[in-house]
Image: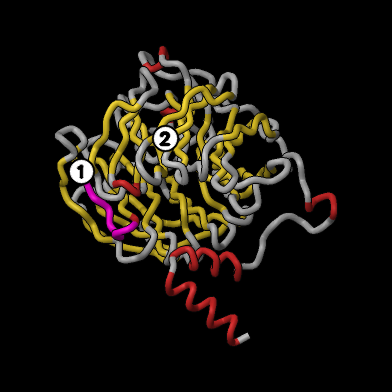
Amino acid sequence: MRIVVAALFTLVILSPAGVVFAVVWTTPYLGPATSAEEAAPTGPVSVLPAPDVQPGTLPATPVNVYANIMSGTVPCPLCKIPPRVYVPNSGAGTVDVIDPLTFKVIDHFAVGSIPHHIAPAWDMSALYVDNEGSSSLTVINIHTGKPSGTISMPYPYNLYFTPDGTKAIDVVERLQKIVFLDPHHGWKQLGSVAIPWAGADHLDFSADGSYLMISTEYTGMVAKVDVIHMKLVGAVHVGGLPIDVKLSPDGTVFYVSNQGRMGVSVIDPIAMKEIQFIPTGKGAHGFQISRDTQYLYVSNRLEGSFSVISFATRKVVAKWWIPGGGSPDMLQLNPAGTQLWASGRYNGTVYVMNTITGKLLAKIPVGLEDHGLTYFPNVGLHSLGHNGVYR
């Protein structure tokens, strides 16, 4: 036993991947029940009502930061662009392009090394492929669906835009920092903030855009950064392996997926503490807001499932399984909100789920280690980047 413990300790010290292995390996499994029937589920635990995307729908609270995504209608002139799902293949250095109307791959092209996510520009005038391994962005022309150039940028794991569109943020996971840039004037650097914990990778902004909350995957911390003055102003420890971050529709709390703890933390950003934990499944990873903004979709990457959390009750109200298993990672919705698209990080597959029935609609083969796919064009007034986060 001493030899095993020593080996695990050495692995953790030498490799961030070792941290992931160690935490997941030693965390109690909060999976499905153990009966034979429940151990291999094939359908949803429960069925959700159809998303409410009727024109003129009013949010349930006085404030809804996602009010602009509720229409289900792509704004014009973007409405004239054929819908496409762009899939970055991190292990292959390529992008696959899917026609979501036929579920077929219709194009394939090379980009830089280790592409992680495809981020729509703040004004949705272009798409940017984050090539972390080659320190560049590949620019995709939204009208042709083809690469149209490159932008030099240090190790972009993720790319975000502030809600007002004045700043871009390069999340430099390798160097434990985020870099603020001016996307309107040659991507000039405006400042940078050191994140003193390993694994900074996903973030979201406050309702007024004055600060952001960013996860640090390998140290269990969630940091708070003042966007205006570009400085670190706080942090909260949630443990495990925090991944994706999402602001609640009413703007009061942040949700943080936690692959190590098998669920989702709810964080009060004023008190800077975890106020609730919601178990979802093994490897809780990616987030997506439902079209009616009533639910939070969560991908459970290590068990091949999706959990649906109600914002009103902060409880899981449905759970959907991928028949035969899978590794769902980052998520996207179609404009109508009836299809949930997920990259399959370890399976070279894109999954499409019906959000009303919870059943699998398609499995689409793509390249190696597909990651932050984007469905474009989509609804919303502006893009906050990542793989297609809109407000």
Question: Which amino acid type corresponds to the residue marked 1 in the rendered image?
Answer: Leu
Q: Which residues are magenta?
A: 174-180
Find residue 224 and report its image quarter: bottom left
Q: Is residue 187 magenta?
A: no
Q: Which residue is mark 2?
A: 388
Q: Dot 1, how many residues are within 10 Å of its Cα: few (below 14), some (14-19), or many (20+)?
A: many
* Residue at x 58%, y 64% (from the top left corner): 24
Position of residue 262 in the picture relative to residue 241 (left or right): right
Image vertical order of residue 305 relative to residue 139, above or below = below
Residue 237 x %, y %? 43, 66
Q: Is residue 177 magenta?
A: yes
Q: Dot 2, how many residues are within 10 Å of its Cα: few (below 14), some (14-19), or many (20+)?
A: many
Residue 157 x %, y %? 36, 48
Q: Earlier in the sequence, mark 2 or mark 1?
A: 1
Image vertical order of residue 280 relative to residue 343, above or below = below
**C-alpha span from label 2 to label 1:** 19 Å
Instruction: Give 370 or 160, whichever is nearer the viewer.
Output: 370
Q: Would residue 248 be seen by someone viewing this image from the given angle? A: no
Residue 158 x %, y %? 36, 46
Question: Which amino acid type corresponds to the residue marked 2 in the rendered image?
Answer: Gly
Q: Which residue is mark 1?
A: 181
Secondary element at image label 2? loop
Residue 182 x %, y %? 18, 39
Position of residue 48 in the picture relative to residue 335 (left or right): right
Position of residue 144 in the picture relative to residue 368 (left or right): left
Find residue 88 and report its image quarter: top left
Secondary element at image label 1? strand
